[in-house]
Image (spheres, coloured by chain):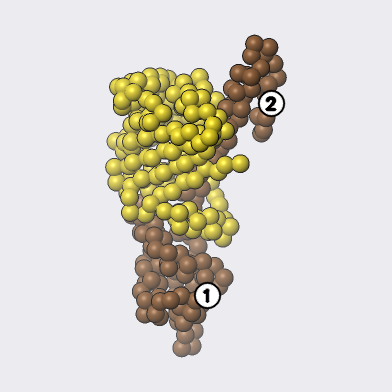
Amino acid sequence: MSKTEITAPPAVPQVIITREFDGPTDLVFRAYIQPELLVQWLGPRDLTLTVDCYEARDGGKWRYVHRDAAGNEHGFHGVFHGIPSLDGIVQTFEYEGVPGHVKLDTVTFEDRHGRTLVRTVSSFQCLEDRDGMIASGMERGVVDSGERLDSLLATLQAT
Amino acid sequence: MATDRLSLVFGALADPTRRAILTRLTEGEATVAEIAAPFEVSQPAVSRHLKVLETAGLVSRTRRATARLSHLEAEPLREVTTWLARYQRYWDESHERLDDLLAALQSDIQDDPVRKPAAREKGRGK
């Protein structure tokens, strides 16, 4: 069972996410660019994803909204840059709750003997944006520091 | 938490020796000599690391008799772990759902043209 690896280098305003999937690259790629597939997996299960537009082409716009059970909405939008391919889906990403703090995401799909390694590099405009964006929060979440310390240290160690 | 404090905490955690010191302090408060013992660094160097951790609010220091004891302050760590845990949870759960979707799509391809409607629901988990 593969695990999602998230690293946040202390001095570089990036977050890097890697994950291997049991499926061929073209299929995993489709799950990332076809909105009818995207809505079936993106985001936690307790949020509903609605895609307004998702034009996966050079200059194409995208926008989607996460809705929770209480009806709270979080909108996100951006633009695709270049023709999306296995070598890279490049898109800007802006959380509408904090306008102006745009990040650039590059997602690549690498064949691993029939499985697919997906690597997402999110580049923020500055460290404060990276550290602040998630702090401003999509969700609640309280964790016990003792329990989580080891995994935090492991995450930071990996950078 | 203010983002500059979060950056300060991230900065303090960027150093492997400082992370090892924090891990040591999860076992309980300790003197500089006790903290320095397992490391190949001098006590003054450990003191400098402790100062950085103290500035970030990760460690506080008290005096008992002649010894100066350092202990872990969990709150900033809790905040920073909450930050990472949120991000981790968002992607963990998304990726688990993508696993399920890929399995369903591939079983559809295999079952085609004799489609089994139940296949889509299989392995959906929670």
Mark number for residue B29? 1
> Which badge, 1 or 2, is on the more N-terminal residue?
1
Q: From what the image shows, is residue B82 above or below residue B26?
A: above
Corner quadrant of residue B13: bottom left
Residue matched to label 2: B122
Colour-to-chain, brown: B
Q: Secondary structure at mark 2?
A: loop
Residue A96 shows up from this direction: no
- CA gap between label 1 and label 2 equals 51 Å
Looking at the image, the residue that sits furthest to the front is A113
Q: Residue at x 66, y 17 (%)?
A: B111
- The chain identifier of the residue carrying mark 1 reads B
Q: Name the spot of residue A13 as percent of width and height, x first.
A: 33, 47
Instruction: State which chain is coloured yellow.
Output: A
Q: Quadrant of residue B48?
A: bottom left
> Quadrant of the image for the C terminus of chain B?
top right
Q: B19 above or below B1?
A: below
